[in-house]
Amino acid sequence: MSSERAVAINAVLKASQLCQQVFRHLIDGETITKSDRTPVTVADLGAQAVVNEILHNSFPDDVIIGEEDSKILRGEDGKQLREKVLSLANTVLDTPLDDEKLLEAIDRGSHPGGTQGRMWTLDPIDGTEGFIRGDQFAVCLALIIDGHVQLGVMGCPNFPVDHKTPEGEKGCLFVAVKGQGSFQRKFTSAEETQIRMTDISSPSDASFCESVVASHSSHEDSAKIAALLGVTKPAIRMDSQCKYCSVARGDADIYLRLTRGDYLENIWDHASGSLLIQEAGGIVSDIYSKPLDFSLGRKLDNNKGVIVAHPKIHSQVIDAVQKVSLNK
Ligand SMILES: Nc1ncnc2c1ncn2[C@@H]1O[C@H](COP(=O)(O)O)[C@@H](OP(=O)(O)O)[C@H]1O
Ligand SMILES: [Mg+2]
Ligand SMILES: [Mg+2]
Ligand SMILES: [Mg+2]
């Protein structure tokens, strides 16, 4: 797994660099609303092209399940955006792409997923809404083999190196390999530090995090669950899989994702984060305590919501979730 680890780190760092450049100059017309009414920017598309291109050059036989596709960049209508995304991708790639190769690279992420074989899953920007606001977002890449996540890498450009000094240095990379632990490094150095969740025995001492966007996870329900658990600290609201990073390194203790209605979560929204937690000593399940099943395609078809906690308190958190009748 060492060459996969190195290639994934390089790809995520390059894509993170691209996102940082865009953020400094994001202008009107570079954020588009997709058909499901969620946003996508030139940075999401550029980052997907960069990561897919780097993965394909190193592992040509592996398939990729990525969030984005090239539809809005095609034809005469897509020309202006396409040129922008191409020039962005080429600022970080060693070998420049042309128009056709750019579209091909992005669309290499269209694999349907499944039970067998080696597949990468990519969220080029997780937390696009956070990215647009200037808050947290993450470039998230994971390698799934025969349905199980074996490697997860996350680049978090706005994430403080030390949560106690939120205005200090920002930019963290997180990496986990199955059976080898979870690690953090700064964007500015290759030195890695192992991270662990906080060893906590009572949920009342816990702090919990959740989505900023209430339509992704009910804030009302989480408040009821927190009250049942005796949690007194206020909810930490944060976009993206940075929530998994916060819990994995002990800044927070519980992550509640109380998905509404019949929404199905995407595998790229949870693959890298879930391994980071497991390798840092935590449990990741859905709201019914079932493990997340990454082998069913592009979505977590058999799961609802996500609950992350230390093994000593996970079952108490699940009990509290079950006592609250969740909002639809
Ligand atoms: N109704 C919904 N319920 C739960 N998650 C949703 C959702 N609509 C979109 N999402 C997902 O929530 C992700 C962001 O999660 P969070 O709220 O934790 O920041 C989005 O990732 P992208 O930003 O990559 O599109 C998107 O995939
Ligand atoms: Mg999206
Ligand atoms: Mg996402
Ligand atoms: Mg995304």
Image (tube, rainbow, N blue to C red):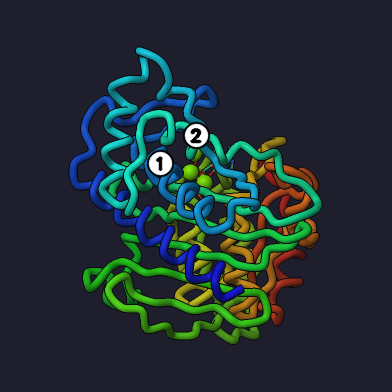
Horizontal and vertical percent for residue 53? Answer: 46, 48
Q: Of the residues shown, which amino acid type is indicated by label 1? A: Asp
- Between residues 188 and 61, which one lies in front from this camera angle? 61
Taking 289 as reference, is 231 left or right?
A: left
Is 246 on the left or on the right of 228, as rendered? left
Mark 2 or mark 1, which is nearer the start of the sequence?
1
Kindly identify which residue carries mark 1: 44
Q: Quadrant of the N terminus?
A: bottom right
Q: Position of residue 122 (x, y in %)?
A: 54, 50
Q: Where, by quadrant of the figure, is residue 113 drawn?
A: top right
Of residues 140 and 136, the one drawn nearer to the viewer in this rendering: 140
Q: Residue furthest left?
A: 25
Distance between the Cα atoms at labels 1 and 2?
A: 15 Å
Which element is circle 2 on?
A: helix
Instruction: Confirm or deny contact between disc 1 and disc 2 (CB under 8 A).
Output: no
Q: Residue at x 70, y 46 (%)?
A: 326
Determine whether, in the image, residue 96 is placed left or right of residue 127. left
* Disc 2 residue type (three-letter): Glu
How packed mark 2 is, by other alpha carbons closer than 10 Å (few <14, some 14-19, many 20 or more), is some
Quadrant location, the C terminus = top right
Q: Is any part of residue 322 visible from this angle?
A: no
Which numbered marker is on residue 167? none
Which residue appears at 29% of the width and 44% of the height?
A: 90
